[in-house]
Amino acid sequence: MDIVVFDNVTKIFGKSKVIKALDNASFRIPSKVVAGLLGPNGSGKTTSFKLIMGFLKPNSGKISVFGKDPWIDEYSVRRRIGYLPEKPVYPYVSVYKFLKHIGKMQGVDIREVERIIRLVGLEEYKFFNIRGLSRGYLQRLGLAQALIGDPELLLLDEPTANLDPLSRKQILDLIKDLKKELGITIIIATHILPELQEVADYVVYINKGRIIEAGKLEDLTHKYFVHTYYYVETSDPRKLASRIIMEEYVRGIEVRDNGLLIKINSAYKEDLLNILTSSELSVYVKNIKHVTTELGELYEKLSRAS
């Protein structure tokens, strides 16, 4: 099922000087993916979020969110969405008081608010004044606010911007946990790519309001011949590594737990699979899984294509 559908959507701002924030944009985002909405600043990412939530009306085209028009059915759509803006503004009150107030507005039981505080790792700080929180914990607060009300769709606008490396990692780990534990659809608007490739499995690339490409990350990896990573679970990782490393298309191997993380150019996917599934292979291969892609490399190729 597609959660979000844009069908030839155009959004124009201004009268004397017309700016097309979106130009005949069409894309779909399926259920239960972590989708990266990628593009340079000013490309139309934040406008797309506002259209999804029904804050803006398109000049032309159709938008469907949960099968409804978000401009017409704004309440029924918006109550199913959690939103973390790029620059949220908070009152000078405690974390607990603020989230309890949000919960009351949403009609949420206080026990649910307590559960979300634990989920995002704010339990130790719940009686802190918000203005005393670090940037990393302010982002956790923003995620907590977005999660109150049990949303089915989470919109995160630049969630790791202006964070130090440790805070960025913690927020990304939290997003991974949210995907795993809650099973919701997450759309992340960002231009910070190395972090996003750890969590995204779907990509929409937008530039100057036009959709350049959209689809599963693994599919786009093969289409544009981008370097990619596979995790291979095996009975003897080191023995398999000594066999695979001889292939010239293998760009790197790392032993992890009971398997190997193998980096290859996606053009050689079938060559790798042929080796791993060969009856002549002397080790047992239990599972082969696409893990991630060199998103920066894909971004550069999509930028050239635009």
Image (cartoon, helix red, strand yellow):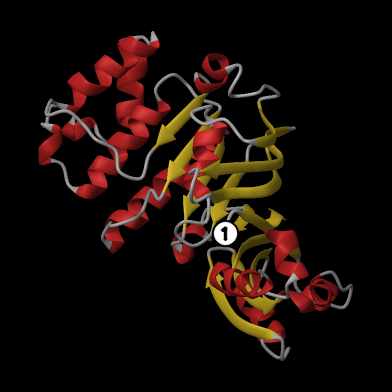
Left-right relation of 265 to 153: right
Residue at (29%, 38%) from the top-left corner?
88
In the displayed structure, 230 sits above or below 17; it is below
The quadrant in which residue 288 appears is: bottom right
Residue at (30%, 43%) from the top-left corner?
87
Q: Name the residue that disc number 1 marks.
A: 208
Residue at (35%, 45%) from the top-left corner?
86
Image quadrant holding the N terminus, namely top right
The quadrant in which residue 124 appears is: top left
Image quadrant holding the C terminus, namely bottom right
Name the foreground residue: 300 vs 182: 300
Residue at (58%, 74%) from the top-left corner?
300
x then y, percent, for residue 57 = 57, 30
- The amino acid pointed to by label 1 is Lys
Q: Residues within 10 Å of mark 1 (few under 14, many from 20)?
A: some
Check the image and name the residue furthest to the front.
16
x then y, percent, for residue 296 = 54, 71
Residue 121 in sight here: no
x then y, percent, for residue 272 = 78, 76
The quadrant in which residue 262 appears is: bottom right
Check the image and name the residue furthest to the right.
279
Residue 47 in sight here: yes
Left-right relation of 3 to 94: right
x then y, percent, for residue 131 = 12, 37
In the displayed structure, 91 sits above or below 185; it is above
Name the foreground residue: 101 vs 78: 78
